[in-house]
Image (cartoon, rainbow, N blue to C red):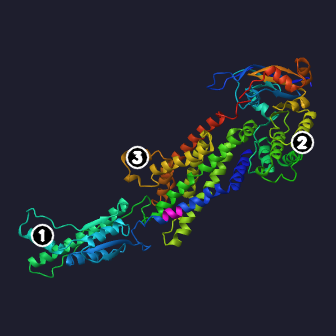
């Protein structure tokens, strides 16, 4: 009964704290929605018709330039705007990038077609000799362009130049062999992607399957703010003294608090997953598939909640002030999320961080969710991660109880 | 009023990291049913003494007995017998008075009809019948003090510790608070009360102890203290004559 009374009290306190409710429910749902919407579909489908504007200045006007422009226009990601050639065109093109009108500009220099043809013919006449390469196609980039975006664009352009090189060489080979219509097939070394999972029936995963569970966990851990806040306020208000002298175990109060916040955390979990199931498809995003995994999602959710609640208790008992609790908690969660692979893939991290990531509760929970959502894992396959989460909960609860039994300052000792 | 309910002998307390002792061999006895005033300037050790008696902090040395049980060894036996009304308003501001009482009542093992009865009595005692379902944060200062006091009486403790219960309270609420205290005292509840309002102590306390620098420097009835302290016409003058007029910050 004492535990139930403590649970009821926690819920009432939260219910009356409207900002706390927004932090608990609305913000995490918005987080999942916007993070999922801002990441592109992993399969590369540009479903949202987002165009990347590129300013193009063609000073060559030869077959190479035409082929390049045709290939560029075929890439749906790009919107090609042509700069009219004139004596100041090059300066105007650079200025357009500097002014931020275009993030990227391409300049195909004059005589590119002629120079390339001459270069190839020289190569045919004198193979294995070093010949000066033609002037390169110039790219002008806004320094504010994200490195990953720049790399992706350059890779696309590199693909186009490779295709043009192949086509030009084919044409030249045809002329040399007196077969002007020579057509050799290309792309005959193909890459086929095959996803394999623990259940051996893997489907192609999409970003929603990765992002929604990951950011859901991130949101769940933010329960630290209201939880630790309530605990620090109890001490600041003096309610703690009344609790201390009541004939009840500290563990009863802790358990009431744990059950209350785990319950809230589970409501959070399903609301955030509901964003993936019901709201993201409204924005032409893939649907989060949960139907086959509800039991395991629930179990992982419980263990992740225990870890998050334990962490909240730890912050709540060890923080001296409300400000400390509400800054320290989220700060540590962001670090744990960053090293835990929520924000960036662990595989792309430096080796030291990859090792540290194995100690982040968010990593354990995310691994379990990934096993469930994209690898179709069974219960026994996620048990190691659940055990780590439970161990973290026991550790944080023990440390919290230690401090709870020996509080630093209950009174102003000035009387 | 003959049985001693609180007995303190040679009590010392040194806070971790502190060079000075907060309590230096304190001796004190309180009889059952007494309205006992614990007076002293800031830093004299009043709150430390109450904190130890309530089990909130551990003594460094000394012997303490509350209702026949030793502290700190038998704290679990003592807890149901004592009530504390801290100087701060120790209630959840965003819960109603009833919700606060219900929560704390459960912690004292009160249930069902008995809990409802006690809640109603506490509301009556505090004179908050029309405000019981309003959040504490909406109360005036006096209402909060009365609610704070009534919450300490919820489980009908044998001994109640009050830490400056009338600080920043309007005269009407102060009057109600003393009516409540005299009423429960007349029913046998022992009251240990700290205050800086010496006229209150003179008016209501059966006996008072004046503390300074971690020790009790005198304890007796207000009448005897005034009579036996040269140049004192009231308890305020006794206090200043015994503790000095220099500032204590």
Residue A3: x and y in percent read: 71, 46
Which of the 4 image quarters holds residue A71?
Answer: bottom left
Asked if both marks, 2 and 3, belong to the same chain, the answer given is: no
Tell whether A7 sits left or right of B196.
Answer: left
The Cα–Cα distance between marks 2 and 3, rounded to whole angstroms, is: 65 Å
Instruction: Find residue B205 and report its horizontal and vertical position in percent.
Output: 89, 29
Q: Which mark is residue A207?
A: none
Q: Is residue B191 above or below residue A138?
A: above
Q: Could you say which is closer to the camera, residue A37 or residue B72?
A: A37
Q: What's the residue at 32%, 62% (across, down)?
A: A151
Range of residues picked out in magenta: A32-36
Element type at mark 2: helix
Q: Is residue B8 visible?
A: no
Gap in angstroms between the C-alphas marked 1 and 2: 105 Å
Please determine whether, in this image, residue A225 is positioned above or below residue A401.
below
- Residue B112 in the image, given as x and y percentages of width and height: 83, 49
Is residue A34 inside the magenta stretch? Answer: yes
Residue drawn at (30%, 71%), measured in percent from left and top? A92
Question: From the viewer's perspective, is residue A139 above or below residue B135?
Answer: below
* Subunit under mark 3: A
Give the secondary structure at mark 3.
Answer: helix
Residue occupied by mark 3: A353
Image-quadrant location for residue A147: bottom left
At label 1, counting other C-alpha atoms closer than 10 Å, the crowd grade (few under 14, some 14-19, many 20 or more) is some
Which of the pair B229/A372 is nearer the observer? B229
Q: Disc 2 marks which residue? A: B176
Location of the C terminus of chain A (image quadrant):
top right
Q: Chain of mark 1?
A: A
- Residue tagged by mark 1? A119
Q: Residues within 10 Å of mark 2 (few under 14, many from 20)?
A: some
Disc 2 vs disc 3: Cβ atoms closer than 8 Å?
no
Label 1 vs 3, first from the N-terminus: 1
């Amino acid at each position: 009964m004492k535990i139930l009374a403590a649970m009821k009290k926690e819920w009432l306190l939260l219910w009356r704290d409207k900002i706390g409710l927004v932090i608990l429910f609305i913000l995490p749902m918005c987080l999942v929605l916007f993070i999922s919407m801002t990441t592109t579909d992993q399969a590369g489908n540009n479903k949202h018709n987002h165009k990347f504007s590129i300013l193009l200045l063609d000073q060559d006007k030869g077959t190479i330039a035409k082929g390049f422009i045709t290939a560029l226009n075929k890439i749906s990601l790009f919107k090609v705007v042509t700069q009219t050639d004139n004596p100041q065109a090059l300066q105007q093109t650079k200025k357009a990038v500097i002014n931020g009108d275009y993030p990227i500009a391409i300049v195909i220099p004059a005589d590119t077609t002629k120079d390339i043809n001459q270069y190839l013919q020289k190569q045919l006449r004198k193979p294995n000799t070093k010949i000066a390469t033609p002037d390169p196609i110039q790219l002008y980039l806004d320094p504010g362009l994200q490195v990953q975006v720049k790399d992706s664009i350059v890779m696309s352009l590199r693909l186009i130049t490779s295709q043009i090189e192949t086509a030009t060489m084919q044409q030249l080979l045809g002329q040399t062999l007196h077969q002007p219509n020579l057509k050799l097939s290309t792309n005959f070394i193909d890459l086929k992607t095959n996803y394999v999972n623990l259940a051996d029936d893997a489907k192609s995963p999409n970003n929603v399957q990765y992002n929604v569970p990951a950011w859901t966990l991130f949101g769940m851990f933010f329960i630290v703010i209201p939880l630790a806040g309530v605990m620090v306020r109890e001490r600041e208000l003096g309610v703690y003294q009344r609790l201390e002298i009541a004939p009840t175990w500290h563990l009863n109060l802790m358990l009431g608090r744990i059950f209350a916040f785990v319950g809230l955390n589970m409501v959070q979990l399903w609301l955030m997953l509901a964003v993936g199931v019901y709201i993201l498809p409204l924005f032409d995003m893939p649907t989060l598939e949960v139907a086959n995994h509800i039991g395991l999602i629930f179990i992982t959710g419980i263990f992740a909640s225990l870890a998050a609640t334990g962490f909240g208790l730890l912050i709540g008992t060890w923080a001296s002030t409300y400000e400390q609790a509400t800054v320290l908690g989220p700060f540590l969660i962001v670090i744990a999320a960053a090293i835990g692979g929520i924000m960036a893939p662990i595989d792309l991290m430096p080796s030291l961080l990859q090792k540290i990531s194995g100690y982040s509760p968010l990593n354990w929970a995310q691994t379990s969710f990934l096993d469930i959502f994209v690898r179709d894992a069974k219960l026994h396959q996620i048990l190691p991660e659940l055990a780590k989460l439970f161990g973290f909960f026991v550790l944080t609860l023990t440390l919290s109880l230690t401090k709870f039994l020996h509080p630093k300052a209950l009174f102003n000792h000035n009387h | 009023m003959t049985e001693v309910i609180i007995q303190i002998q040679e009590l010392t307390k040194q806070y971790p990291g502190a060079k000075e002792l907060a309590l230096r061999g304190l001796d004190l006895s309180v009889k059952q049913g007494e309205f006992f005033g614990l007076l002293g300037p800031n830093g004299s050790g009043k709150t430390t003494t109450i904190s130890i008696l309530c089990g909130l902090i551990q003594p460094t040395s000394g012997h303490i007995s509350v209702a026949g049980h030793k502290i700190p060894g038998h704290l679990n036996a003592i807890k149901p017998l004592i009530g504390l009304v801290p100087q701060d308003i120790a209630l959840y501001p965003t819960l109603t008075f009833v919700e606060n009482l219900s929560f704390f009542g459960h912690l004292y093992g009160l249930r069902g009809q008995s809990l409802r009865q006690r809640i109603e009595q506490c509301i009556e005692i505090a004179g908050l019948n029309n405000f019981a379902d309003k959040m504490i944060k909406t109360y005036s200062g006096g209402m909060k003090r009365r609610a704070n006091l009534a919450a300490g009486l919820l489980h009908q403790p044998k001994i109640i510790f009050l830490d400056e219960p009338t600080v920043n309270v309007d005269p009407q609420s102060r009057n109600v608070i003393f009516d409540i205290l005299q009423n429960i005292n007349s029913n046998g509840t022992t009251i240990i009360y700290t205050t800086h309002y010496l006229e209150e102590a003179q008016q209501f306390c059966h006996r008072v102890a004046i503390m300074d620098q971690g020790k009790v420097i005198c304890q007796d009835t207000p009448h005897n203290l005034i009579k036996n302290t040269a140049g004192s016409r009231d308890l305020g003058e006794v206090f200043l004559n015994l503790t000095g007029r220099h500032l204590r910050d």
